Amino acid sequence: MGDNELGAFLRSRRETVTPAEVGLPDGSRRRTPGLRRAELATLTGISVEYLTRLEQGRDRRPSAEILAALAGGLGLSTDERVHLYRLVKTATGGTCQGAEPLARAVRPTVAALLDRLGATPAVVLNRPDDLLACSPGFERLAGPVGLLEGRPPNLARFVFTDDRARSAFPDWEQVAGQRAAGLRAAASLGDPHAARLAEELSVSAGAGFSDRYDTAGSLPGRTGVERWTHPFAGELVLAYESLDLPGPDEHRLIVYLPADDVTSAALDLLTEHTPA
């Protein structure tokens, strides 16, 4: 993990915003992607010199007013605004997540919820992508592709180090980018477990992981659609929702729903032909 995550995040977000998106002319001879610092300065009322200090890590204590102006100028989502605030707190010593052990157990009520979901694929993950608990439907979905074989099972490790992942996820590039972005976001907030896994994957998966990790400029999507290829059910198109669970451990529940009638029928058949 770098020592200037705040600056890296601001720079990466600036480079993804096009002038047209914020009502500025898109002139020729642009040497950098996205907005120039001068253009962001015009949008936010913040000097180019101060923006440079923030991106280079020479100032890590921007005021709430500066953060609000940057969030507005960059068009940050609510999640990204929260992440920006937490990056500042981390950079100034306001968090101490590294002192806490990694919690792998889910509350009994969460386990009961997963059981009630039954055939609906649902899984609980922690910050470094360990699979902590899942519904019977997720076992039927993920077990045959090999995702549940780790000790503990880990989604990011499976995606980057298990050859079966490329068959399980036809859109592997998209899934890999999401997993790298999730680890980068957690590590940038001082999570030592996510940082340790990132170091491991940089060695075990090489540039396939490290290039995505180093260039991750966005937070992973909390909703979306994924394609899975199941050895028995065939290709499945699944819409997912990611929900934060209350508590200090930052567990998240991901629920998958069929995105089309073919997938719905395939999941029904998978449930009917899998022993309880």
Image (cartoon, grey):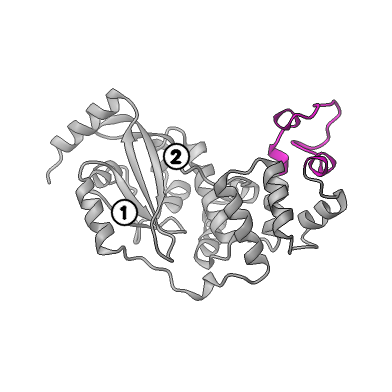
- Three-letter amino acid code at disc 1? Glu
On screen, residue 230 above or below 6: above
**In this view, which residue lies farthest toward the top?**
261
Stretch of the chain drawn in magenta: 14-43
- Please report the residue visible at 32 percent of the width from the left and 36 percent of the height from the top: 257
The residue beneath circle 1 is: 149
Q: Quadrant of residue 225?
A: top left
Crowdedness near tag 1: few (<14), some (14–19) or many (≥20) residues, C-alpha within 10 Å: few
- What label does residue 201 carry, if any? none
- What label does residue 223 carry, if any? 2
Question: Can you give x and y, in whole percent of width and height, for residue 88 in the image?
Answer: 66, 62
Question: Can you give x and y, in whole percent of width and height, for residue 242 in the image?
Answer: 41, 46
Please tell me whether mark 2 sits on a helix, a strand or a loop: strand
Q: Quadrant of residue 66?
A: bottom right
61 vs 147, nearest the viewer: 61
Question: Can you give x and y, in whole percent of width and height, for residue 222 in the image?
Answer: 46, 44
Instruction: Answer with mark 1 or mark 2, whichever residue precedes in sequence.
Output: 1
Please tell me whether mark 1 sits on a helix, a strand or a loop: loop
- Three-letter amino acid code at disc 2? Thr
Residue 94 is one of the magenta-drawn residues: no
91 vs 214, nearest the viewer: 91
- In-image side of 200 versus 62 (left or right): left
